Amino acid sequence: MNNLYILILAGGSGTRLWPWSREELPKQFLSLAGEESLFQQTVRRMTKIAQPSNLYIVASDQCSALLRHQMKTVVKFDHDPIIAEPMAKNTCPAIALGLAYLLKSGADPEDLIFVSPSDHIVKDDEAFKEAINSGRQAASEGHIVVFGVKPTRADTGFGYIEIDEERSKGLPYKIVSRFVEKPDEEKAKTYLERGNYLWNGGFFLFKAKRMMEALKSDIPQIGEPASEGYKSLISSFEDLPSISIDYAVMEKEKDVAVVPLDCGWSDIGSWDALYETMEKDEGGNVKKGDVHTIGGKNNLIYANGRLVVGLDVNDLIIADTPDALLVAKRGSSQAVRDVVNYLKDQGRRETTEAPINARPWGTYQILHQGDRFKIKHIVINPGSRLSLQYHHHRTEHWVVVRGTALAVVGGKEIYVHEGESTFIPKSTPHRLVNPGKIPLEIIEVQNGEYVGEDDIIRIEDDYKRTE
């Protein structure tokens, strides 16, 4: 049997679930359906299909710290699984990059590669695994395989796959007749009634050499440098077209196979889609966090960090975070993207900055921010340290609230214990180290004419961020 590799695409930066999702914290890293994030759930699901040694993640450099932070609680890798994109270029360049990297790293052209998004919900992992196993025969026979989700409603938010019933007779899988763009409501109802249309779920399975051939013939701007090898593709990545694999390859191929997928799937493309997917209480409410409803019905209320109470409210979406609150009518959440664009035009940082940010050494949360100051709660993992750095425009004051810190300030080492503090002047090289066995927690107060995150000049860094 062909060896199976997994490519998880984790480079998305959608904002349709704002204010929970931000540019710095895309939805794949959010715990929307359970305690684990969608990305963590995806990694765990993939380890049931292939060995961790065959699992890789394609994502941007900016996401690498967050990926590593979340992966370590799910599975331990003997290799570095992250394939870094120089920049976001949609799914076709991302898949080509992953494919070229796998071939460079020892994958055989006959090996199978399964491509999965990182931000979807799958409720039935066993049914999902069975569908993948069913698709292996078609992929081994030379088909590019797409997995189509059985529609449960006439939805206008998905692309559809039409099954060629005649060519599919006698086969253990189906043959695709055509891919259909997102339809209007009338066409969506027709597709649902006919029964030979599936939603395009964004999962693919193929032989390495079969996809490489398709890239070269269907979109040579990507296929040619990919076929020349990983280094060639990386060097030309900036000039590659930003295009989805559906447009670039799938819609042009004439012999695509499709395997029906019935596994409780949702792409969670909006707050309304999340409401439809999640379990509801006796009043039809979907609640997460410290949420209480009195007399209300059919609401989605997500709280992050504080108590939220709904009193006699109906059919609302309420999404709360430490620094932003969204209140909308259910059914209107597709317009959240317009809200985000409006806020961007206003220069609001809440569209990009996440309340809690992951770094290779731990996390930080912005507690409060003004014109000339910023207050952070910083958590540093045991044995980890920040870069040796300095700032042109701000001073910093560190107060230890848990653990013991080793502060390096101006070349001097100072141990700072709980309840103690130290001060860092402008332009002074400094570093914060956790020498202990428990997480180190500090409150950092920044003060100066500019307190942006880009006022960091790194001198030395354990995570190679000085390059």
Image (tube, rainbow, N blue to C red):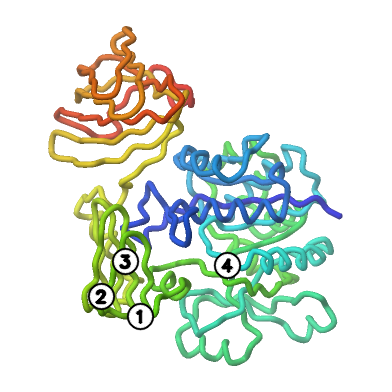
Amino acid type at mark 2 = Ile
Which disc is residue 294 wearing? 2
Q: Nearer the viewer, mark 2 or mark 3?
A: 2
Sequence-first disc among 2 and 1: 1
Residue at (48%, 43%) from the top-left corner? Answer: 87
Instruction: Say what amino acid the circle numbered 1 marks.
Output: Gly
Percent from the top left, x then y, of residue 210? Answer: 76, 57
Q: Secondary structure at mark 4?
A: loop
Q: CA distance from mark 2 to mark 1?
A: 10 Å
Is residue 251 placed above or below 234 in the rendered structure? below
Give the left or right position of residue 108, taking residue 431 as reference: right
The x and y percentages for residue 263 are 62, 71
- Residue behind mark 1: 283
Give the distance between the C-alpha atoms of the residues marked 1 and 4, in whole angstroms.
22 Å
Determine if residue 467 is in view.
Answer: no
Depth-wise, is mark 4 or mark 2 nearer the camera?
A: 2
Q: Earlier in the sequence, mark 4 or mark 2?
A: 4
Above or below 174: residue 143: above
- The amino acid type found where label 3 is placed reads Val
**Spot occupied by residue 143 in the image (x, y as percentages of width and height):** 77, 65
- Residue closest to the eye, 368 or 36: 36
Q: Amino acid at mark 4?
A: Lys
Q: Residue at x 76, y 52 (%)?
A: 4
What's the residue at 46%, 41% (across, down)? Answer: 66
**Disc 1 + disc 4, Cβ < 8 Å:** no
Cα separation, mark 3 vs mark 1, equals 25 Å
Q: Which residue matches tag 3?
A: 336
Of circles 1 and 4, the one toward us is 1
Report the quarter where the N terminus lies: bottom right
The mark total stands at 4
Residue position for label 4: 123
- Please tell me whether mark 3 or mark 4 is closer to you in this view: 4
